[in-house]
């Protein structure tokens, strides 16, 4: 029987809670230690997951005997310091995005990962999604182009409020310009998919709206990008008139058909002149993608080949996002 892999979790907001729920049913990943800067978050977590043990601090958790991996779900400013401490302790790291607020520190960390063969990945949920696999099959470098030549990509995001109501417990940083906003939190997933399939992108033009006061995160973004010869249009807004409180759509249009990702894991494929064909029920596709992500995490911990995004890929995504947020 394969060995159990013990995981420590630092950061017990929404993402930390969701990962704990998912790990709970996995046959090999075992969440055993947790910590958060907010004692109330620790108390709530232990009430829901009484089998867990709370460490006295992040350093104590990372230094605990018997751990194989650390999952980091804190605000971005702490990601790299925690990752480096985990590497010092010999742990594999799965970190939430955005990766960092310090690009120079990120490059140093990426160099360390390469030089020391550290095990590290970033949680972009679409990395294991069946929809991304369909995009790679249709438009990736090794594709036979079954839908013809890719001509354009459109990304549309809409939010009735930001942060979204279910993120209320995650902290005020999500609503602030320094680390939060929908571009870093949501658009980044789709920029990741774009760059995973097509490679580097170039920001041609970007227009961003911010609330008055100099603190709040963006309320609207419209941009034009270029990925090779492919034009990419991005539109996102926070508006109480958005018909669905939280919506996203990514359309890949080619000469002989198109693929659309919608509402995270929903995906359809259509040849020109035919009806759109669903790749499966959205919830089934979500479950498949999430299950595969956990398996890829196991591969990461064991030093095997995996499909999770590395820190270098996550930094490339964030460089694009930050360029969009600067406007031009």
Image (cartoon, helix red, strand yellow):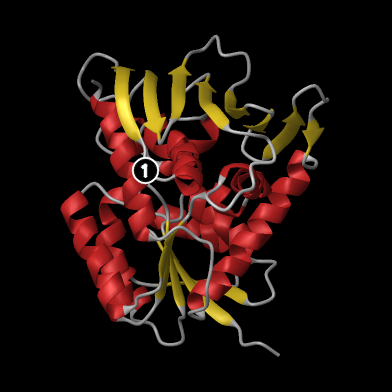
Is 250 situated left or right of 80 in this image? right
Q: Name the residue under label 1.
A: 200
Residue 156 visible in rendering = yes
Give me the residue at 82% from left, 25% from top. 274
Expressed as whole percent of the image width and height from the top left, the position of residue 251 reads 60, 28
Expressed as whole percent of the image width and height from the top left, the position of residue 230 reads 46, 30
Q: Within 10 Å of the Cα at label 1, are there few (<14), some (14-19), or many (20+) other Cα atoms?
A: some
Give me the residue at 52% from left, 26% from top. 152
In which image quadrant can residue 34 be found? bottom left
Give me the residue at 36% from left, 37% from top. 201
Give me the residue at 40% from left, 49% from top. 97
Is 14 situated left or right of 205 in this image? right
Please name whichever residue, 19 or 141, is drawn nearer the observer in this view of the structure: 141
Q: In this view, does 297 lie above or below 16?
A: below
Is 240 situated left or right of 183 in this image? right
Residue 176 visible in rendering = no
Expressed as whole percent of the image width and height from the top left, the position of residue 46 reads 54, 63
- From this viewpoint, which residue is outermost toward the top? 241
In which image quadrant can residue 180 be found? top left
Q: Assign the C terminus to one quadrant of the image.
A: top left
Say what secondary structure mark 1 lies in: loop
- From this viewpoint, which residue is outermost toward the bottom? 1
Please name whichever residue, 270 or 171, is drawn nearer the observer in this view of the structure: 270
């Amino acid at each position: 029987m394969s060995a159990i892999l013990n995981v420590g979790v630092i950061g017990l907001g929404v993402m930390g809670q969701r990962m704990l729920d998912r790990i709970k049913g996995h046959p090999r990943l075992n969440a055993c230690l947790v910590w958060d800067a907010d004692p109330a978050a620790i108390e709530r977590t232990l009430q829901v997951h009484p089998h867990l043990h709370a460490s006295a601090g992040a350093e104590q958790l990372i230094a605990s005997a018997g751990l194989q991996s650390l999952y980091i779900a804190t605000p971005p400013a702490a990601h790299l310091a925690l990752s480096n401490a985990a590497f010092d302790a010999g742990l594999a790291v799965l970190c939430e995005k955005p990766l960092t607020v310090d690009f120079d520190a990120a490059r140093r960390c990426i160099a360390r990962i390469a030089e020391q063969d550290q095990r590290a990945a970033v949680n972009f949920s679409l990395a294991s999604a069946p929809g991304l696999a369909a995009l790679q099959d249709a438009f990736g470098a090794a594709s036979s182009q079954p839908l013809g030549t890719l001509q354009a990509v459109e990304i549309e995001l809409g939010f009735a409020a930001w942060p979204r109501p279910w993120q209320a417990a995650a902290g005020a940083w999500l609503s602030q310009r320094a680390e939060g906003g929908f571009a870093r939190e949501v658009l980044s997933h789709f920029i990741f998919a774009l760059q995973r399939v097509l490679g580097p992108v170039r920001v041609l033009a970007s227009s961003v709206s911010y609330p008055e006061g100099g603190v709040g995160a963006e309320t609207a973004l419209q941009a034009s990008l270029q990925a090779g010869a492919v034009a990419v249009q991005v539109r996102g807004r926070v508006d109480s008139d958005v018909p669905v409180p939280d919506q996203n759509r990514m359309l890949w249009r080619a000469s002989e058909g198109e693929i659309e990702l919608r509402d995270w894991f929903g995906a359809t494929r259509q040849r020109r002149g035919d009806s759109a064909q669903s790749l499966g029920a959205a919830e089934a596709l979500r479950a498949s993608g999430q299950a595969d992500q956990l398996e890829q995490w196991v591969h990461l911990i064991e030093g095997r080949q995996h499909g999770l995004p590395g820190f270098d890929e996550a930094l490339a995504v964030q460089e694009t996002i930050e360029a969009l947020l600067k406007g031009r």
